[in-house]
Amino acid sequence: MDPTADIAAALAKPTRAERAIALGEVLNRLPALAAHVRELRQAEVKAMHVKDDMSWDEIGKAIKQHRTRAAQIARGVPGGNKKRKNDEGAPPAK
């Protein structure tokens, strides 16, 4: 699942067009890689709670996340991409 070899192969193509096509194909496969990594992470966090008998607070501290986020990860709840209050409608920083 590591795309490094595919990226190197794409960059070794003889023309810019072939390189662009090959890199596009690699990009098309990245969502599948991300989904796989999320599943692996979910299983690890869930095992910390179920098999290692850790509390959500302990897990949160161990993985450097809030305890609520740790529980969400174990349930497979997607995270990120949220806007902060100060970012909404604020003018660009100078």
Image: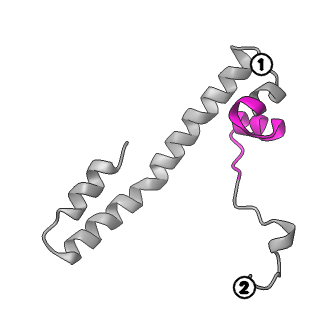
Q: What residue is at 34 percent from the left and 67 percent from the top?
A: 24
- Residue type, mark 2 in image: Lys
Q: Quadrant of residue 55?
A: top right
Helix, strand, or loop for circle 2?
Answer: loop
Q: Which mark is residue 94?
A: 2
Residue shown at the point (72%, 44%) measured from the top left = 77
From this view, report whether residue 87 is shown above or below residue 12. below
Foreground residue among 3 and 86: 86
* Residue 67 position in % (x across, y down): 82, 35
Residue displayed at 70% across by 14% down: 52
Give, as a single range, the part of the protein colored magenta.
61-79
| Disc 1 crowd, CA 10 A, few/some/many (<14, 14-19, 20+) | some
Asked if 48 appears above or below 63 in the picture, the reply is above
Query: How far apart are the alpha carbons under marks 2 and 1?
Result: 45 Å
Q: Amino acid at mark 1?
A: Met
Residue 7, how many percent across, how many down?
Answer: 29, 57
Q: How many marks?
A: 2
Check residue 65 for magenta coloring. Answer: yes
The answer to whether residue 70 is above or below residue 23 is above
User: Which residue is identified by label 1?
Assistant: 54
Please tell me which of labels 2 and 1 falls first in the chain.
1
In this image, 94 relative to 39: left or right? right
User: Percent from the top left, x then y, of residue 37?
Assistant: 52, 40
Query: Is 79 placed above or below 41 here?
Result: below
